[in-house]
Amino acid sequence: MSYKLHPLDFSIPSEQVFESIKNEDWSVFLNSNNKKYTDQRFDILSASPKQKIIFSDDSAYLINKNEEPKKTELCPFELLREVMSKYKSNCDTDIPFSGGAIGYISYDYGNYLHNIENKNNHFNQPLLAFGIYDWAVIYDYALEKSFLLYHEKNSITENIINNNKKSLDSNVMPFQITSRCESNMNYDLYEMKLLKILEYIRAGDCYQVNLSQMFTLSYEGNEYELYKNLNKSFASPYSAYMNYPFGKILSFSPERFLSIKNNIVETKPIKGTRPRSDDPNIDKKNIEDLESSQKDRAENLMIVDLLRNDLGMNCKKGSVKVDKLFDIETFANVHHLVSTIHAEIDSESNIYNLIKDAFPGGSITGAPKLRAMQIIHELEPNNRSIYCGSIGYISFDEKTDFNISIRSMISKDNNLYFWGGGGIVYDSDIRSEYNETISKVKPLLDIFSD
């Protein structure tokens, strides 16, 4: 399946190009924030998919344009593989996405996979949603060029070609908060739940559990304006804005879940956090404290072992390797301890099995994964929705990249939901763990309080 390329004006920022398609059906913007993270190479923008795959009410549905959803007996990953096989194409190695699937997998789909009942769904959104896009605008920051990739022209691609240099309408409703920001856990409730986790750990049920709290507020105005505003101070290398009729997703994730190219998969789990400081001396001290923390290293190593096992289910025996252990990576508001693992997918398996069997990422569940997820379900008042799920793409040529959607929010019915969490282990200190959940969302809280 061949595609065509049309060069665009690289001087026009990707954020501005997305303005012209942000209100189109299922418009998506995968934003690498290359200006801050220069090792990140590509931005990908698209809209109006040819087909859609959703998972809702315990069933997968295929939706063709202008048709009613068709229920299938396949699991959504089997359906995704079947649909994508009809579009397969070879692609230049420098092009990350030659058309394909872009979407999300909610953390709650992980509950479904592991037979954990989802106790509430007041977000009322599919547990999984992918559009099949046959065109995209791609920014390549290494080559300093942008281009439109398409298999067939449509009205949107024609408009992009014809209006690439045209200034865009900025007459949008400003974003404003209309309520206090509330959490589903105050400190006392958080303390009670953390103490329960420590009981489970002492009893040998688990070694680590990720506990999070959910924040909610009401708003008026344009969600993409909020995304752009937040991105100025909250920018991360695996960010995304996704416009769905059942809610808009704003993600500022620093964490890669899975990247796949030529059957080689890479994952980069985060475990270990210290806040950033405007004072260089304090900031340096925080880094040194994280580097030398035996507790954080032990947490990180636990998750590295978990992910080695997860990848091993679908990768060649002996191919799972740890490339980097306990690297320090610095983001907008925190320093993180990050490890890097790679493996080669077994010829008897495929990328769809690998994604499904590794989901959700172990860094946001705990260990062992199943028991940690059961405890999360027991103790957290609400389902997690997009938080701790994954956002990303599978190209027609099977290049793949997914984040773990931490530092993410969903907007629905003029309510905004976002989360902060952290891993609880045997020697966790209640106050410092609570403060870590706050430090991860502090830029949001500061902006909203202003």
Image (spheres, rainbow, N blue to C red):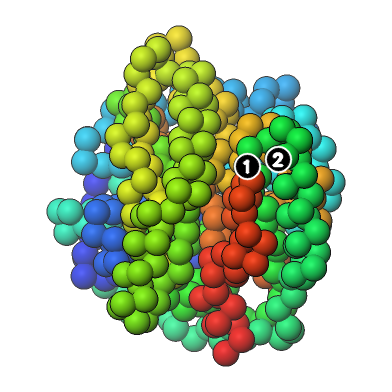
In the rendered image, residue 339, in percent from the top left (x then y), is placed at 38, 42
In the rendered image, residue 209, in percent from the top left (x then y), is placed at 65, 45
The quadrant in which residue 193 appears is bottom right
Residue corresponding to mark 2:
201
Q: Quadrant of the C terminus?
A: bottom right
In the rendered image, residue 419, in percent from the top left (x then y), is placed at 64, 62
In the rendered image, residue 43, in percent from the top left (x then y), is placed at 34, 55
Q: Residue at x 81, y 45 (%)?
A: 378
Is 446 left or right of 220, judged from the image as shown? Answer: left
The answer to whether mark 1 and mark 2 are in CB contact below 8 A is: yes
Q: Amino acid at mark 2?
A: Ile
Is 231 left or right of 369, judged from the image as shown? Answer: left
Q: Amino acid at mark 1?
A: Gln
10 Å crowding of disc 2: few (<14), some (14-19), many (20+): some
The tag earlier along the polypeptide, 1 or 2, is 2
Q: Which mark is residue 208?
A: 1
Q: Residue furthest right?
A: 119
Q: Residue furthest bottom?
A: 450
